[in-house]
Image (tube, rainbow, N blue to C red):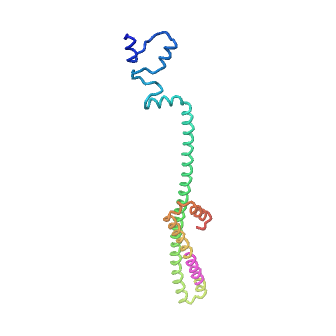
Amino acid sequence: MFLPDAQRSNYGYREMTTETTPESNLANALPAQNSGQVPEGNKPGLAAVISTLKNFRELLVLAAFFGGGLGGGVVWVLNYFATTEQHGQLECFTKLNVRMLQASANANYTGELIKQAKSELRDQQHILGTFKQAHADAEVGATQAKIDELAEQISAFKATKEVQAKAAEKALNTLTQNACLVRDQRKMILDELASGKF
């Protein structure tokens, strides 16, 4: 559209020429008046941010690369130590459960041995009574020795059963108190279990 020079300056129109003169370069570099165009450096909002970030593309890629590596390393370290802690807790709980079950089973087995020994003791006492009635002094002495031996076995079995029952109770109490969750207590428990003092 061709307008007279006076109107052109009022509406902000420029002539488009193929000639490049210093005046035309200066006119092209200056923002147009009243044209509604925004210069490239003053773009509003997201477009301005994107154009600014394009200038720092390589720096942003490097930051993302090293940030991702650092973040991944932190995640790995946290998972490694969390897994190690949980492994220790699991080991403690498992060994305490095994100790409790083993001590309970041993106490029950010892209880069965006590029952058998008491049954045999009653039999030997019955035999002793029979030998005493028959006045068989040689058999009375041998039977009395068996009775005394069985009585000693029963008392030893009772002591062993008591120790095993206490070990099972201690393991159960330790499990119910969640002592395996505390690192220092867990170490002490595992040491006692390994040495056989538990």
- In the rendering, at what x and y percent does residue 111 appear? 51, 73
Picture quarter with the C terminus = bottom right
Residue 81 versus residue 182 in the image, above or below: above
- In the rendering, at what x and y percent does residue 192 appear? 60, 65
Q: Quadrant of residue 124?
A: bottom right
Q: Residue furthest right?
A: 195
Q: Nearer the viewer, residue 2 or 58?
A: 2
Q: Which residues are magenta?
A: 144-157
Residue 88 versus residue 11 in the image, above or below: below
Q: What secondary structure do most residues of the magenta stretch adopt?
A: helix
Q: Nearer the viewer, residue 193 or 180?
A: 180
- In the rendering, at what x and y percent does residue 61 appear? 54, 33
Residue 83 versus residue 30 in the image, above or below: below
Picture quarter with the N terminus = top left
- In the rendering, at what x and y percent does residue 190 appear? 59, 62
Residue 79 versus residue 131 in the image, above or below: above
Q: Residue 35 lies in magenta, yes or no?
A: no
